Image (cartoon, rainbow, N blue to C red):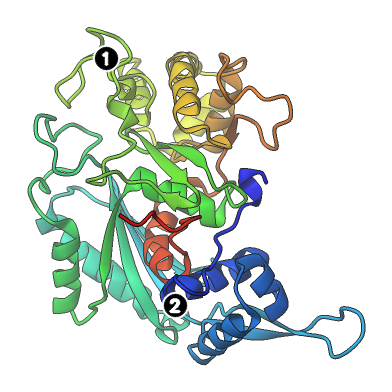
Amino acid sequence: MTPASQHAIGNNPGRSRSHNRRVVLEAVRLHGPLGRTDIARIAHLTAQAVSNIVGELLAEGLLVEDGRRRSGRGQPPIQFAVNPDGGVTLGIEIGAHRLTTLAVDLAGRLRAQRERSIAATDPAHVLPLIVGEVAAIRATDSIRRSALLGVGVVMPGPFGVDGLIAGGPTTLGGWDGLDPAALIEAALAEAELGEPVLLGNDATAAAVGERLHGAARSLRNFCHLYFGQGLGLGIMIDGRPFGGAFGNAGEIGHVVVEAGGRACPCGNRGCLEQYASLQALEEQLAAAGIGAVDSDAIDRLHREGHPVVTGWIAEAAARLAPQIVTLENLFDPEAIVFGGILPEGVIAALIAALDPLPTSVAGRRHRGVPRVIAGTTGRLTAALGAAALPLLETMTPKLDRTPPPEV
């Protein structure tokens, strides 16, 4: 069985009921509409277990009946689908220059979206803005009628690291030593908007966003290279995000690629982020007398063949190629996804400039997808992933394939 065809499975005697509910929801979300027999086959659960769980999920409004499908003789089985009106989750991305807030329903549809620029990223400035944006989202008609399942918040890492200087244009100032989730949850509660808040790294969340809504929907094991203001990496293993012990897995932007190279605000020199990030591109454009560029301006400059942009693409590709080979040899992913706030045309050109990639364990003759592919969720990738954090708790099973051995 190939990794792409694997699914989480239930466990009738020993697995918790909560896990089996998630297994059923994931099966319907990925393959639905489905009948009870098909759900039982995919989830490896008994027909009785599926019947009980489906009944619960119907009563809670997480599933809905979706007609009957003819399949030979007898009464056609009832099909079940995820109820898009069964609830919504909010996603908040705190970036270096912007705050994005959106709402996503259980079917993955974007219900509401707000975006605003921010002059500062410290809690005193950002917390009131978050409260205002959440209040505005929740006041919309399509959201007011839906149950709110939780709030996901993502921001650039690293979190709680000694030795790395917490500064520079790719990090958020003012949060060092604080608990962002607790502060945001308290601010929302004070405004009577209280919901559980889950915190994540923006690059890891971006991988989740592509897994649920984008180019990686059919992939269970992949790496997502996230071009925010800096450069991050999201790692998905068996359909679950890998965050590491302290939420800092994937800080690829601070991998040293040139000894004694360009100074990095983290305190090291020659970090990958200094060569292959939006911030690096903006600095090179500023040095050429082109300042205050946004995504549209970079896209225009690329289409015009501006030498700074084309030169950055060539240098970034040369720096990234060995890192891609390392990721492939370490994690054996089905593919590596490029995404983030870079224009689509620049990402496509960056991927094209990688060809040919050096040899790695990914060099198989019969590949289902290319070694490197472009994401499809655009600049909303991390915010969609933020909204997915509560969704993961509600709908996605902890994807253990076998029970841990007893000690």
Q: Quadrant of residue 188?
A: bottom left
Q: Which mark is residue 17?
A: 2
Distance from disc 2 to disc 1, alpha carbons, whole Å, reads 50 Å
**Image coords of residue 311 (percent x, y):** 47, 13
Residue at (72, 24) in percent of width and height? 365
First in residue order: circle 2 vs circle 1: 2
Looking at the rendered structure, the kind of residue marked 1 is Gly
Residue at (37, 76) in percent of width and height? 149
**Image coords of residue 264 (percent x, y):** 21, 21
Residue 282 visible in the shown view: yes
Asked which secondary structure carries label 2, the reply is: helix
Asked if 160 appears above or below 350 in the picture, the reply is below
Q: Which mark is residue 270?
A: 1
Q: Which mark is residue 77?
A: none
Looking at the rendered structure, the kind of residue marked 2 is Arg
Q: Few, some or many C-alpha atoms within 10 Å of disc 1 (few <14, some 14-19, many ≥20)?
A: some
**Image coords of residue 121 (percent x, y):** 18, 49
**Image coords of residue 96 (percent x, y):** 26, 43
All told, the count of numbered labels is 2
The residue lying toward the viewer, choosing from 237 and 191, is: 237
Q: Is residue 72 left or right of residue 395?
A: right
Query: Which tag is nearer the camera, tag 2 or tag 1?
Result: 2
Q: Is residue 274 left or right of residue 347?
A: left
The residue lying toward the viewer, choosing from 321 and 92, is: 321
Q: Which quadrant: the C terminus?
A: bottom left
Name of the residue lying farthest toward the right? 73
